[in-house]
Image (tube, rainbow, N blue to C red):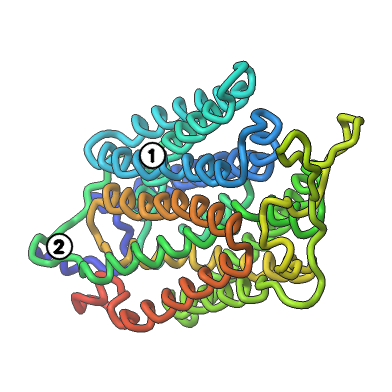
Amino acid sequence: MSQFVDSDENTPLLRDEPRSDDVNDDDYRSRWRSIRVMYFTMFLSSVGFTIVITSLWPYLEKSDDSADATFLGWVVAAYSLGQMVASPLFGLWSNYRRRREPLVCSIFINLSANIYYAYASLPSTGDKYHILISRAFVGFGAGNVAVVRSYVAGATSLKERTNAMANMSACQALGFILGPDEVDLIEDPEETIDQVAAYTSNVLFFIVMFIFAVFETIATPLSMDMFAWTRREAVFYNGIIICCIGFESILVFLAVKVAAQRVGDRPVLLAGLAIIFCGFFILLPWGNHYPKIQWADLKNNSLVSQLSSNSSFESTGCPYDQTWCQYTPAIHLAQYITSDFLIGVGYPACNVMSYTLYSKILGPKPQGVYMGWLTASGSGARTLGPVFVSHVYTLLGPRWAFTIICIMVAAAIVLLSFVYHRLIAFSVRHGRTIE
């Protein structure tokens, strides 16, 4: 018990027996070498995800003519559903076995699933279902996020943790060799985690990831409807926008480290939510300019989109079967870019602060399972978000979709304000350090 009380925020959670300074230096370097391997793992995972998400809708449309925007929501959600199922399992596995095992297993699953996705259009029928299944398996393989984050949280001190989480998130934006596999963390059974703070952190993270899932899902269909972009143009221009947001996020992650040290984690999280609210509020349609409509001809008692005899011609604009296109004002390109910029600032700030606060609330205990549940809540949000926005957007249009998102963000700000005083580090709660 005395050993537990003597630990402070400056002491890495990788507690070793007293050794020589040279050995301690070697252990410290080994620990950070392992953490950088985790950064690289997250980087590669993010690169693969970004490449797919920007081209998913055109790939789905080209592979199967029967696929619509609603089915796109299920395909995007399949990834997160797979990750939601896998994250707690891999997190539990990492708590009892060497972390190499779940990492290698998840990478093998991810690689196999991506190969399946690449060839999903080869079967003569049911291509959209092959794409759906392959994305679910890719998401299952991506459940290693829980293992990566639990390792980084467990292998760093409380003061190092914000920097480590921000650096890892920056590696995600840019795109198994572990040192010590088992971390013997000190735990006092008499001191428990604040369940309200832990549950609230999961809810806030759910909302943050739900909002971003909506943003990344709707970007391509929205731009095609509002700006009459072709599939090729939508993939190209949105790819450029997401690339810019990625670089923007890196700068935000670097700024977050400085801001959190000066004002604390909670104010940064609150500011991030406020910026996201502004981003979606700006995206609401207004004015008297309406989107171009994809009209249709009546042939053999059925509606058929107007296409020329030239098969290379692609009809552009807002589909005629989305009735809101005829009375909802178009979103201006300036609105779209401004919203992208604001969300690119608010989301990374909320993301890294959510993980940092959660790991500090948990304190010096094995965090594999806990990080698994946090990742699962985020994956659940990324499962429901695409389904929600694909249905609401298709039936009611962007005005309703983005209004509901603004209400959700406002609710998250109110929730954070109510529990603000409870979202504090484990060691602060139990009086061993001053906040």
Question: Alpha carbon of mark 1 to alpha carbon of mark 2: how far?
Answer: 24 Å
Q: Residues within 10 Å of mark 2 (few under 14, many from 20)?
A: few
Give the quarter of the figure containing the N terminus: bottom left
Q: Residue at x 51, y 46 (%)?
A: 39
- Mark 1 touches mark 2? (CB < 8 Å): no
Which label belongs to residue 245?
A: none
Q: Is residue 37 visible?
A: yes
Q: Residue at x 27, y 71 (%)?
A: 197
Give the quarter of the figure containing the C terminus: bottom left
Q: Residue at x 47, y 59 (%)?
A: 210
Identify whether 324 is placed above or below 152: below
**Rendered location of residue 156, percent (x, y):** 37, 57
Tag 1, which secondary structure? loop
Kindly identify the amino acid type of the residue bearing the numbered disc 2: Gln
Which picture quadrant has residue 153? Answer: bottom left
The residue where tag 1 is placed is 179
Q: Is residue 163 visible?
A: no
**Rendered location of residue 278, percent (x, y):** 61, 77
Q: Residue at x 41, y 39 (%)?
A: 82
Kindly identify the amino acid type of the residue bearing the numbered disc 1: Gly
The residue where tag 2 is placed is 3
Identify whether 273 is placed above or below 386: below
**Rendered location of residue 93, percent (x, y):** 27, 37
Mark before the other along the chain sequence, 1 or 2: 2
Which picture quadrant has residue 178? Answer: top left
Image side of residue 9 versus residue 237, left or right: left
Tag 2, which secondary structure? helix
User: In front: 395, or 379?
Assistant: 395
User: In front: 142, or 29?
Assistant: 142
Q: How many marks?
A: 2
**Rendered location of residue 243, percent (x, y):** 71, 52
